[in-house]
Image (spheres, rainbow, N blue to C red):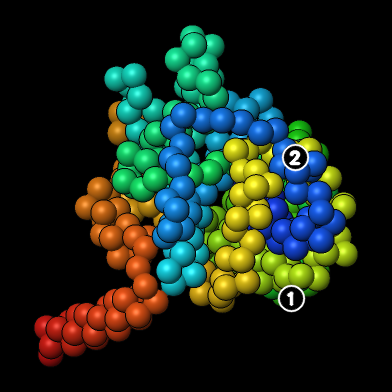
Amino acid sequence: MSKGYKITIMAVTCFFVILATMLGVLAAKRLTTIPLGEKVTMESLDKMDSSVGMINFLILGVDEDGTRSDTIMLFSYDGYSNRINILSFPRDTMVKTGGFRQKLNAAIGVGIQKVQSGKDKEPEEEIIRQIKTMTGLPIHYSLTVNFDGFKEVIDALGGVDFNVPYNMNYDDPVQDLHIHLKAGPQHLDGQKAHDFVRFRHNNNGSAPGEYIMGDEGRIYWQQKFIKELLRQKLTPQLLTQIDDVFEVVTKNVKTNYTMQDLLKHISLVEKIDLDQIGSHKLPGEAQWVGGVSWYIQDVEGTEKLIRDVFLPRSLEEWEAQKALQQVENTEDVAAEMAMTE
C-alpha cells in the first residue's frame, strides 16, 4: 500500500483548518506574529487579480522523503458566486518534462533535481507549471504537507463524524498497519480517520463498492470525506481549538499563503455555501502504455470542464448555466429513449 494514501485528507484538512481559524487568529490580534508554516516564494505562481474573481489553491500531499506527491488537488474559489470547486488529479497522469514521459506525482521529484541544478527555487515549481498547462488556470497559492501530523490534526479538531460506507479489514504487518472499521455512522478520531484514508481493499483482495475503480473510487470517497469535514469544522466554534490546531498545522505546512492573505480573504469565508462544493476529477482514462499504467488526460473534456465549471461568473450566470445543463440532460435522455423504442 502506497504511503501516499495516508496524506490525502491531511493536505485538505490543513488548508481548510487555516481558513477556519481566521476568526480566532484575528481575535487574538496575532496576524503579524504567527507564521503559516514554512513560508516560500515561487516564481511559477500567479499574482491575485484585484477583483478577487478567482482564487486557486494547489494542495500537494508528499511522502516522507518529499519526492512524490500522491495527493494533488486544486481548490478554486469563484469570488462572484462564492462557489468552491475541487479538481483532483490522478497521480498516474501522464505529463512530459525534459522531453520524457513522467507520472504527475513524480513531477515534484523532477523539481528537486531542478532546484539542485539551480533552475528553480522550490521543488513545487515543476508540478505547478504542469497543472497550469493541463488546465489553463492560474495558480495563486500552493500548500505542501507531509502525512506525519495527520492524526494530530484530526485529534486537534476533535475528530469527525462520518458514515463509513463499507466494512474495512486490512492488515499489513510490515507497515504495522491494521484497518478494522465497521460500516455505519460513527465518530472517527485521528487513528480511525487515518485508517479510513489509507483503505484500498480488504485482506482477501476484495474492493467494495466504488473502491473497485481504484484511484477513481478512492478519489470519490476522499471528496465525500472532505465535504463532511468542511461542513463540521469550517465554523466559528473552532475558536476553542485555535491553539492546538494551529500548532499542528504550522509544524507540517509549507506555503506561500500569509497572514496578510488571511486578513484579505476573511470576509469571503462567511459567504461560502459548504453544501454546494463541487468535486471533479481531471477528465481522462487509465491506459496501459508501453507496459506501464498511465492516466491519459482528455484534453477536450478538460477544456469543457474548465469552461463550464471553473471560470468565474456571476451567481445569475451560474444559475442560468445549470438550467441550460438540465435542459440538455433532459433532451439527451429523451433522445436515448426515442432510439430504444
Element class at badge 2: loop
Q: Please give the name of the residue rendered at 81% of the width and 54% of the height, measured from the top-left corner.
A: 29
Residue furthest top as drawn:
117
With 85 as the anchor, is 261 left or right in this view?
A: right
The residue tagged 2 is 35
The residue tagged 1 is 185
- Quarter of the image for the C terminus: give it: bottom left
Q: Please give the name of the residue rendered at 57% of the width and 73% of the height, measured from the top-left corner.
A: 271
Q: Which quarter of the figure has residue 185?
A: bottom right
Q: Is residue 285 visible?
A: no
With 133 as the anchor, is 160 left or right in this view?
A: right
Q: Residues within 10 Å of mark 1 (few under 14, many from 20)?
A: few
Q: Earlier in the sequence, mark 2 or mark 1?
A: 2
The one of 133 and 29 positioned closer to us in this rendering: 29
Q: Position of residue 142 (x, y in %)?
A: 55, 41
Q: Residues within 10 Å of mark 2 (few under 14, many from 20)?
A: some
Q: Amino acid at mark 1?
A: Pro
The one of 90 and 231 positioned closer to us in this rendering: 231
- Quarter of the image for the N terminus: give it: top right
Could you tell me how far apart the alpha carbons at marks 2 and 1 are, in whole angstroms? Answer: 37 Å
Q: Position of residue 247 (x, y in %)?
A: 84, 45
